[in-house]
Image (cartoon, helix red, strand yellow):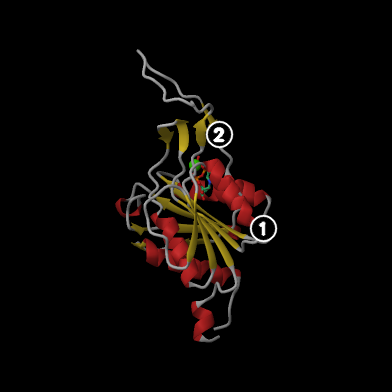
Amino acid sequence: KDYFSREHKLAGKKVVVTAGPTRERIDPVRFLTNFSSGKMGYAMAGAAAEMGAETILISGPVSLPVPSGVTRIVVESAEDMLQAVDAHYDTANYVIKTAAVADYRPKAVADKKMKKQEGGSTIVLERTVDILQHLGQQKKGQVLIGFAAETNDVGQYAKEKLERKNADYIIANDVTEAQAGFEADTNRVTVYGKNGFVQDFELMSKQQLARQLLEMITDKEEPHDS
Ligand code: CTP
Ligand code: CA
């Protein structure tokens, strides 16, 4: 194959990437969220675009520039992210779920700012939809890639998520490692796939890692002659 096709392995493909945290409103001035910086997801979207894909980045609220060649859709809550992903799912070839989606949201959202009172308080939470699991149930040939940030038993949890969500790959990292946390510009991951596939990646920048991950996955999904 020529240089062009090697560099643009995702030409003609549509890649949907989700990134960042979600925000789950409590009242008009408050919300629940998490420490996701969006950096890994933005790097994945940038790398997909570099490789020639039509790239849709569905992003929770973060302050990062849109990577070159990427179309960004900004969402707030897990529910908004679900709707946006669903709208692009049928036409997607790869869906990469880098987002740290909130698992719970307040059951009731106050329409006025809540006022403080004497004593403690309780917020009742309900589950959000597991977007990746939902996509796994509807899968029609899309390659589904999840991320898992863990603090312990990384491999065991990653394999459980691969099964439960019917994903093709889970890219797992230990966020207790200094250079692999949410805010870091570097990451070290292990990829888990079907049939016991496991591959470790070295510590590197999120940009470099994104390229290597997409190289590896596209090679495995559509082997090209050398
Ligand atoms: N995910 C999702 N929708 C959710 C929760 C998670 O799509 N409501 C996706 C994430 O984007 C990620 C993968 O599932 O690609 C794994 O997320 P993670 O939070 O590690 O898994 P959970 O199933 O939520 O398990 P837990 O938080 O209990 O470890
Ligand atoms: Ca979760």
Quote the CA–CA distance across marks 1 and 2: 25 Å
Q: Is mark 2 within 8 Å of ligand 1?
A: yes
Q: Is residue 19 above or below residue 101?
A: below
Q: Nearer the viewer, residue 68 or 174?
A: 68
Judged from the image, the secondary structure of the residue bearing numbered disc 1 is loop
Residue name at image x 65 percent, y 61 percent: 91
Q: Is residue 175 above or below residue 4?
A: above
Q: Is residue 180 left or right of residue 99?
A: left
Give amino acid for label 1: Asp
Q: Which residue is mark 1?
A: 90
Give amino acid for label 2: Arg
Q: Is residue 79 above or below residue 87?
A: above
Q: Nearer the viewer, residue 86 or 194?
A: 86
Can residue 160 be seen here? The reply is no
Q: Which residue is mark 2?
A: 127
Asked which quadrant contains residue 12, the reply is bottom right
Q: Position of residue 43 (x, y in %)?
A: 42, 61
* Quadrant including the C terminus: bottom right
The residue lying furthest to the front in this view is 112
